[in-house]
Image (spheres, helix red, strand yellow):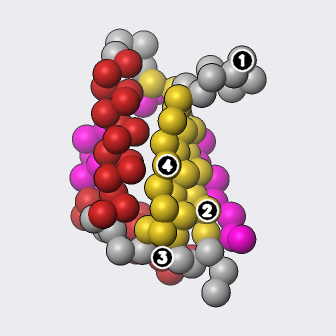
Amino acid sequence: MTKVIHIVIVKFKPEVTEEVKERVGSEIRALKDKIPEIISATAGKNFTDRSQGFEYGWIVEVKDKNGLSGYNNHPAHLEFVSKNKPLIADLIAFDYEV
């Protein structure tokens, strides 16, 4: 079986506090307990000067391409997106198989 790695990196809007940014990361990690397709979920703040302004990122590993679809359409993920999308100025999402 081929796993899928889902990567998201974000630039938050200027008014978003560090506390809120950390909460978003915690919410991503918590999705692992709510969405069965997730194998692992990590999130963290960039610490280098190479990020071109992108501040935070997360990686979600799912079982396969069908698992990515299940993750994207799961009510817990849709709730996360609805709640946090207004905080984000820009993002890049990237998916690949391993």
**First in sequence: mark 4 vs mark 3:** 4
Question: Within the image, what quadrant is residue 37 found in?
Answer: bottom left
Q: What residue range appears in magenta? A: 77-98
Residue at 63% x, 53% y: name it: 94
The three-letter amino acid code for the residue at tag 4 is Thr
Position in image of residue 22 (x %, y %) = 37, 30
The Cα atoms of the two marked residues, 1 and 4, are separated by 21 Å
* In the image, residue 33 above or below residue 26: below
For label 1, the residue is 49
**Callout count:** 4
**First in sequence: mark 1 vs mark 4:** 4
Position in image of residue 92 (x %, y %) = 59, 42
The three-letter amino acid code for the residue at tag 1 is Asp
The Cα atoms of the two marked residues, 4 and 3, are separated by 17 Å
Determine whether, in the image, residue 96 is placed left or right of residue 87.
Answer: right
For label 2, the residue is 5
**The C terminus: image quadrant:** bottom right
* Depth check, front residue: 96 or 40: 40
**First in sequence: mark 2 vs mark 3:** 2
